[in-house]
Image (spheres, helix red, strand yellow):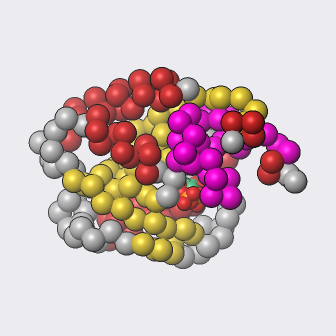
Amino acid sequence: MKNDVERILLTKEQIDEKVKSLAKEIKGAYKDKNPLILCILKGSFIFTSDLVRALDFPCEVDFMQVSSYGSGAVTTGELVIKKDCSTPLFGRDVIVVEDILDTGVTLSKLMPTLIERGANSVALCVLLNKPERRTVEVNADYIGFDIENEFVVGYGLDYAEKYRNLPYVGILKREIYEK
Ligand code: PRP
């Protein structure tokens, strides 16, 4: 697995430090709100598990898996909910946790859906942000790292379902995804 990585972009230590500072920021706004931490599967499972362990105040956790038809500038396609969360969102302060904000298409559809379900507030926390790739405006409230437009894997992120279990974020060798 390691041999398929061109170079490490973010070490485990850099990520750990960032998770702690994001948790501190989130605590400032949510410590008395019992927020619902909504992990968007699959990519976000590792980031979410580290983040919630760094939140030293009451919160709840649930999971959703979504995808969107259409890519690039196509914003009219439907949001496909592959797995739904079981927690009623009415009146809740929701923090959506994502591994990566890329074109913005998925989140531009998901966030209004959560509001429609009656959430009191919906915030977005992403570990990685690729601003260069954005085709739809999405505002993230908490951002771990702005990164270049590289093919990244690890710490939850995959290529063809592999590499999610790497403890760091690495840039995949071009020959792996171009073969
Ligand atoms: C990734 C990521 C977001 C979405 C972002 O999920 O977790 O949900 O893509 O892309 P966008 O900004 O271009 O919409 P992916 O579809 O790769 O699924 P996975 O998390 O299960 O790997």
Give the camera-side residue of 85 and 165: 165
Give residue 79's position: percent from left, percent from top: 51, 73
- Left-right relation of 159 to 86: right
Give residue 52's position: percent from left, percent from top: 29, 42
Residue shown at 34% from the left, 28% from the top = 20
Indicate the quadrant containing the N terminus: top left, top right, bottom left or bottom right.
top right
Residue shown at 64% from the left, 53% from the top = 162
The picture quadrant for ligand 1 comes to bottom right
- Left-right relation of 88 to 41: left
Residue shown at 85% from the left, 52% from the top = 178
Give the camera-side residue of 10 and 126: 10
Residue shown at 80% from the left, 51% from the top = 177
- Left-right relation of 55 to 149: left
Give residue 147's position: percent from left, percent from top: 62, 34
Evaluate whether residue 78 shows in this view. yes
- Left-right relation of 3 to 144: right
- Outermost residue on the left side: it is 32
Indicate the quadrant containing the C terminus: top left, top right, bottom left or bottom right.
bottom right
Give the camera-side residue of 121 and 35: 35
Mainly helix, strand or loop, the magenta region? loop
Q: Compared with residue 169, is residue 158 higher up or lower down, i.e. above or below?
A: below
Magenta residue span? 146-175
Q: Compared with residue 17, is residue 47 higher up or lower down, i.e. above or below?
A: below
